[in-house]
Each structure stands twice: as structure tokens, then as C-alpha cells.
Image (cartoon, rainbow, N blue to C red):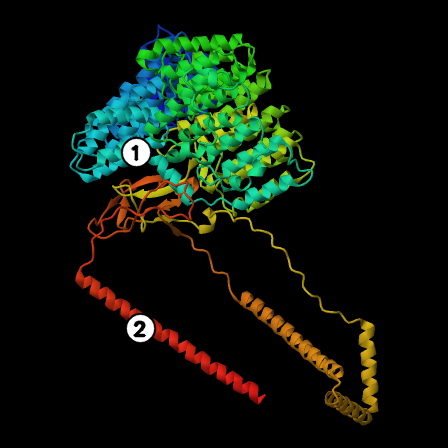
Amino acid sequence: MLATMSQSNAARPAVATATGLVAMLQEPSVQVKSKVLEKLLACVDTLWHEVAESLADLESLAEDAEMTKEVRQTAAAVASRVFFHLEEPTQALRLALDAGEKHFNFQIKTPYVERLITAALDAYIQERRKEVDGDEAKSGDDEDGTGIPTDQLQGMVYRLLDQCIEEGNFKHAIGIALEAHEPTKLKDILVASKSDSSMLTYALESSVSLVSSKALRQESLNIIADCLKEKLPTESAAAVDLVLVYQILGKADLVASVFVDLMQSENTDNGLLALQLCFDLVDSGDQAFITSVAKQLKEAKPEEDNSGCWAQIEKVMTGGFTSELALSFLHKQSNADLLIMETLKKSMEERGSGGRNSILHNAAVVTHSYLHAGTTNDSFLRDHLDWMKKASNWAKFSATASLGVVHAGHLSEAMHLLQPYLPANPSAEGEGGVSTTGGFAEGGSLYALGLIHGSHSGSSVEKLKETSDYLRTHLRASHANEVISHGAALGVGLTSMGTGKLSVVAELKELLDTDSAVAGEAAGIAMGMVLVGTGAGNTNNMLPPGDKEEIMELIAELKNYARETQHEKIIRGISMGLALMQYGQEENADAFIEEMRSDRDPILRYGAQYALALAYIGTGSNKAIRILLHTAVSDVNDDVRMAAVLGLAFVLYKTPERVPQLVKLLLESFNPHVRYASCMAVGIAMAGTGDSASISLLEPMLDDMTDYVRQGAILATSMIYMQQSDTCNGRKIKSFRERLSNIVSEKHQSILTKMGAIMATGIIDAGGRNCSLILGSRTGFTKLSTAVGLVLWLQHWHWFPMMHMFSMALTPTFTIGLNKDFKYPKKYEVQCNSKPSVFAYPKKLEEKKEEKRKRVETVALSTTAKEKARLARKKAKEGGAAMDVEQDDAKMTDAEGSTAAASGDKDAAETTDAAKSEKAEDADDKMDVEKKEGEEKDEKEKKKRKKREPEPTEFRLNNPSRVTVAQAALCTYDLTQRYVPIRPNTSPLGVLILKDTTPGEKEELGMIKPPSLQPEGETSPPEPFEWAPPTEEEDAEMEEAKTEEDGGESNKEETPKEETKETGDAAETEEGEA
């Protein structure tokens, strides 16, 4: 009977309804159910809506142990497809895995299979992430929401990976392995791809961007490093990725070994590549790591350095050459507008503009330092010393410290520059020589000394140590004066940043124990700077092994001290110091941060938000974002909510476009602190982009009802407009600049809004218009100095001297090509595929010239014209009679004139002559006016005729030249030049090591020289030279030449005398004849 059914069904058309088949599932016969299930499987994709009514029966059949395995699998396959059409992929996947490979084959690419594969990957990745986050209790072999055993999911994912490897889809396999946190499978994939360079690069980029767990990322990177190391002997290009991997892993000794291999190679290009990698390493800003690499290289340095490459690398890493480069560029290429400060000063001195307000005066001094940061140009301060002397107390401290911002990186002249302000050397007795009062200029000078040495990454290690020792001497001796202690502590933190030295931390802890509010705050922050990125206080940390236990005890004492002291400033200093220590620690800092977040003290919770932001900086971690957003809307303290919103900018700086989307709703918050922080977060994330969407988002906040929200909107807008030309955002940048100057001069604006406008004036043109806020380096690392500087600058909300930390956050944006001797070829150029106006400097202000008053011609009245017309008609009627009368009158007048002259009536003659001369002058004036009017008309016509020439669509940049981040994406290298970059596939932003393709030819090179404090008018002494007396032949030649010159000059002198005599005789003859 069943055979007859199957034969007759084969001849029939497709089933139109599944109602009958569904009803037959109730038959007791196993054979009938098996055939019915096969029929349902064939038509379920079209009739699934009818089969869905009996899903319960199908699932019971799939689980019925009395049924054969084939029947159970077929029932599961039918039910799986019904769930697929019901858009429940998880249930469909569960049943498909029960159905087996016969009914769920990866090889057949159908929408059903592809959707279930996606569901399987999502489910497995979710399970693995839960395991990584520590939720092993939830993710066992049994169900966890999906109802699918982990073993089944893992088996399916492994089969998918094997299939990708067989088909050669290595990138897909790498992505699956990394997202599923399967480093062992990653190694199999890379081995199967034969360690292809493109696959290794893809795996490296994916490991950094996809893997959220730091521990698993390091495991993946170690596998990639092993593969790269095998390729290094044959491919020197692998050294680029290998150095990057070792730097992420923090292995200084292995980075040094790669440099050694490159420099010992016979190929000279490898030596140039080592120099380029060295500059890229310094660009990351982690001075402690760079110093440890240099230490390893010094041990491996050969006795004879024939190539000079070892000395060059040492110069870059520890000799401060990169700092000299930045300083030289900012000094020579500065485009700072000197009239900005002059105009600002005049606006503030206007009556009612707040010129006498100490806050605005302090903001103006700081703005000057922003405008000229790193350029060493302090001429405005020297020209307006009387204006500067208005600063008193802490304003004097700030004014003196601003010199450190202006001269940032000028290490060679730092002590000479600040000598008039530095405190006297402490006596041997210790604190006895320090006064307990005053010391504002002295404290500011110590702070300035730290800013000069700590603002630029790549400063000279020797100079840093020398200055740090000098500052520590004053730190130990100045406990009696909190102002000097404050400046010394901040200076020590800047010069010892990231060193992790126990001795420095102990000295700062001694200052903290004095229980001075101002000095204690600086000590807490400085301790954070010394231990930045070490993870002090965590179970897994990067502290020096010998000092680990003592530093951990100090951190425990710090936390207890913060809970016991009554000084809010000290608590804030400690909380910010603890936050800096968690820089880049990611999940290692979770327990530490959670402890701070749950504290009762709002200031410690405030520090916890910055700790979270710095721990996950640039990672885009969803966990960190979720915590920050939750705190931003739930915490009871306004400062904590503000810090949480600001933290979003640091976590998401690598994907800045997400920040405006996240804070869009927060900008409409009822809490003004949240609105302020939202504005600043947008400004930090989008700094230097000129993004029109972000500007339009901030525009309504410029008119907010709260003054400090307006201040935040102004500062954020100025950050976005940094290094933008006058054509940016439909030329709206011009109106914003005008608005800034108007706010300063308005009488009814609040002090905080004016302060924001003054600071924004300096930020928008910072560093001579050659600097910007850039948190990421060219190789993708977060710049430690920039991140620390930006976080500390934001503390100016509580303490104005923190404004100077903006100097650390600024990054010079330039391109400079250097040869192997670190000289720059002047004829080397970079091609920019854009119009010059897009990236041009903004137009400078122009002095208002006093307009000269012009003589206005007399206008004839209409009545006068009518009268003249009437007289003319009357004369015309009289005809010839009138003509005769006029001629007689003329004759009479001439006769009278001659008679007067003959009779000696001199007065009458003079009067007549005067009348004639006046008439002649009037005629000449009329002629001149008509001539000028004609010339003006001709000029206007010429201008109209001239057509405006179209702007070129590309131009070339000289060496060196300013290059903004956006401009670098449009730049290309001309590889036909004599000099070509050793790495032509990189961005031109920063230092480029060039290869000379024709080394035998002559070349025009420039030297990198730091600026000098000597006035430009004074010439430098000549270089040493050897003098030899002239020979007799040379003496004879010199005498002949001198004789010829004397003869020529005497002839030239005689000729003019004769001409003058002849001219004089002719003049006398003419006078006699007259």
C-alpha cells in the first residue's frame, strides 16, 4: 500500500495543502509517520504556516526515544524550518543541530543555512564572552537562554573554520576565531595560510580592534609575533608589524632585538627602516618604554659604529632630537597673529568689559601661552610688562608658569630663561631658608620648568633627569611654603612621568603627609603622573619587581588617607592620581575601579569615572560605555555625572563620530553640568575636524541660559575649528571668530562666558596655528602625554593652574623628510591633491588705519542754477552789444593793471596777479579731479574685464611644512624625485626617513637648529678657522687690483663735477637773459 502511495504521489503535482499530511502524524504506524515527515520536509518552505499548528507534535516526535533516529532527525528538520520561517533562529538552530548533517549541510548555501550559521556564531561568541567576563557558572554544558549545549555549538564553529580553511577564506576564518576567542584555532589558520604577509597584517589589525579582552588579545598577538619572527630574516617589512606587536605587549627587550637585527643587516635600507621605526616608537609618547628599549640597545651596541646608525637611534630615543624637531618647526613656521593679543587687550581695557577682573586677566595670559605654545615667542609679554604686573598671588603663579607653555621643549635655554624667577638654592640646613609666605613667582617658575621639559614626548633623558633632581631638591626643602611646594610637585610629576621610581613617589608622599590642601593636591596628581600606566593597586600590574610591595603599600595608604582627610583638594588630587595609574589597564583595573565607584565620597567616585575612561581609552569597550552612561544619568552628584560624560570622549576617540550620537540627548538634559560635559566631550572627540554636524549640534548651546554651559560650548567649538581655514563649514568659522571678540567686549556677558571666549581665542590658533589635539599616534597607539595632559587640563574647572596642562595635549602637525644624517633636503616635496584654500592658514587681522578726511566739492543749489540760466538767456538776447561791453571792460582792466605796475602801485598789481594765479590753480584742480576720475573708471573696467582664474586642484608642500590630519589623507608621494620615503605606504604626518636614489649628486640640505635666546640683530661669532699670511704673488695682485679700483673711482668722481659746473653756468645765463 505504501509503495502504491509513493508511486501515485510521484506522478501528482506539488502538494497544495499540508492539512492532510499534518493529520496523518497522529497515525500509530512508524512507517506512515516517516513518509509523512518526508513529504512535510519537501513542502514545508511553502506551507510552513499550516505545519506551524502542529509544532508541538513535531517537537515531541523529535524527542521520542521510541522512534528511530532517522524519524527523530526528520521531525527535527521539519520543526527547524518552521521556526526559521517564524523568525526564531535560535530555536531553529537547536532543532537543526538535532537533525544532523544530513538535513543541515554547510556546503549547500541557502538562506536557511546561512541564517542558522549566523545564529550559531552569535550564540557561541556570546557564550565565550560570558566565560571571559567570569560568568562561568552561567555558561556550562547546559542551557543558557539559547537552550543549546556549548559542545554542540563549539563543534559547529570548528567545522565552519575547517571549511573556511579548505576553501581558502582565511580572512573569514581569522575573524571567526578572534571573535569566538579561539587563539588556538588562529594559529592553525595562520599556519595553513603559510604565514602570508597580508594575512598576518589582517590578523594584527583584527586582534587590536575586535578582541575586547586584554588577556586574550595578548595571547593572539603572541601567536602573530611568532609567525612574523619566522618571516623576519627573509622579509624586512615584517619588522614593522613585529615592532608594533612587541610594543603592544610591552616587551622592550624584544623590540630592541628587532632593531639590532635591522642595523646589523648588510642592506643599508634596513638601517633607514630602523630609524623610521624609531621615530614611530617615540611618537607614541610612552617615554618609560622608550627609555627601556634604549637601555637594551645600549647593551647590544658594538664597539665600533661604522655606519653611525647606532648613534642616530640613541639621539632619537634619549637625546631629545624629536623634541628639537618640533621646537624648530614651531619656532620657524609659526603663523601666530600678533594682533590677536593686542586686540584682546584693548577689548578688555574698555570700560565695563571686565579688564580689571583677575579671572579674565589670568585667562588672557593663559591664552597668550596657548597662541604661542612651543614657539618661544614671548614678545607680547615683554612689551607689556605693566599689564602683566597686574597679576598677583595665584595669578602671578599662573603668569610665570605660562612661560613654560610658550617655551615648551626649549630645554637648552630653560634655566637661563627662568633664572630671574627661580627660588634660591636651598641651604644645607634644609627648610630653614624658605619663607612661609609669598613665593608665587618662584612656585610658578618651578612649574614652568616642568612644563618645558615634560610637554613634548622624546625629550632628552639626561636633561629630564637633571631637571628632575633640581626640582626634587626644592621639593624637599619647601614644605614650609605651600605655593613653592605646589609648583615643585607638579614639576617633579612632569619630569618623572611614567618612570615609576619609588624614591620620587616617597618624597611626594612626604609632602602629602604635611596635610597642606594646596600642596597635597599637587602631590597626589604628581604621584599619579610618576606611576601612570603601571596599574599600581591592581593584582596584575606593571610595577618594577623590586619596588612592587612598597609601592602597593603606599597606594593602600593613599586610599586610607583620602577617606580620613577633611581637605577636598587633597581628596581630589589623590583620586585623580589613582585614575592616572589605571591608564591602559582595561579589565585588570575593574576591581580597583569598582571599589572607587561604590565609595560614599563623591570626589572618589569622580576620580573613578576618569579611571574608567583612562583604563579603556581608545578601546570603544561597550562595558565601559554602559557604565559611564548609567552613571551620567543616575549619580546624585553633579561633578560625578559631568566626569562620566567626559569619559565617553576618551573611550571612543578612535570612532569619534559615535560621541555626538551618544550625547545628543544629554545635550538636552535639565542638569547644566551634564550639558557642559556633553559639549566638551563633542569638542574633544571631534577636535581639529571642522565637522559641520558637530558644530550645528553645539550652536544652540552657545545661547544656553547657564553661563558655564555657554563656556563649554565655546571651548568645544574652538577645538573643532582648530587648524581650519577660512573656507571651513561654509565660512561660518569667520562669524565664530567675530563672535568671540564680541563676547569679550560686551558689557553684560557673565565672567565665565567671557573667560571661555578668551581661552577659545587661544585654543583655535594654538601653537602658532601649527598644533592640534590628537590622541592617537600614526601607528595607532594612544599618546600617553596627550591623554594625561587633556585629563589634567579638564581639572581647570576646579583649579585654574591646571590650564597650563593643555601644553601636553597639543601635538605639532608637520611633515619633514630627513636623510640618514638627519638633514632635510630642501627640494623634496609632497603632493597634496586638494585646493590650496582648503588647508590654508586663516587670514591674519589687519590694523585699522585712520581714514583721512577728504575735501568735499561745493554743491550748487538748484536756485543758483536757475539764476545762471536766466542770466545766460538775458545775455543771449542782448547779442553783440553785450560782447562789446565785455571787451571794453577787459581792456580797462588790463590798462589799470599796467598803470598800477608803472606807477609803483605794487598792491594793486599783486592783487591782479593773485586773482590770475587763483584762476589757473582752480583750472588745474579741475583737470586733476577729472583725470583721477577717469583713471578710477579705467581701473574698475579693467577689474571687470579680468576673469577670476580657477584655483588649482592640487599643490606641492615644501620640506618641512604644516600638514593637518585631514590633509594627510589627501597627500601622496612623488616617487620620481631623488629622495623617496623608506616606507611609501604610510601617512606623511610626522618624520619621514628618506632614501637617496642618486647619492653621488650634489644636494641642498638644511640643518635642524633649536632657537636661541639671542636677539636677531646680534650676529653669532665666526667659526674657528686657520689664517695663513699671503704670498708675494698674492700681494702684487692685490695692489694692482686696488690701483685699478682707485683709478676708476677718481674718473667717476670727476665727471659729475664737470656736469655740475656746466649746469650751473647755463642756469646763470638763463637768469641774466631773464
Instruction: Answer left or right for 900 relative to 207.
Output: right
User: Which of the pair 311/676 is nearer the observer?
Assistant: 311
Q: Secondary structure at mark 2?
A: helix
Q: Is residue 1029 above or below residue 426?
A: below
Q: How many marks?
A: 2
User: Which of the pair 46/199 is nearer the observer?
Assistant: 199
Task: Write down the residue under mark 2.
Answer: 1047
User: Can residue 143 be seen at all in this image of the molecule?
Assistant: no
Q: Secondary structure at mark 1?
A: helix
Instruction: Answer left or right for 435 relative to 740.
Output: left
User: Splitting the image into 4 quarters, where does residue 291 fall?
Assistant: top left
Labelled disc at residue 316: 1
User: Splitting the image into 4 quarters, where does residue 889 fall?
Assistant: bottom right
User: Splitting the image into 4 quarters, where does residue 5 fall?
Assistant: top left
What amino acid does circle 1 point to?
Val
What amino acid does circle 2 point to?
Gly
Q: Is residue 23 above or below residue 398?
A: above
**Picture quarter with the C terminus:** bottom right
User: Can residue 517 be seen at all in this image of the molecule?
Assistant: yes
Q: Earlier in the sequence, mark 2 or mark 1?
A: 1
**Residue 79, position as x, y percentages in the image:** 41, 17
**Residue 985, position as x, y percentages in the image:** 31, 40
User: Which of the pair 913/280 is nearer the observer?
Assistant: 913
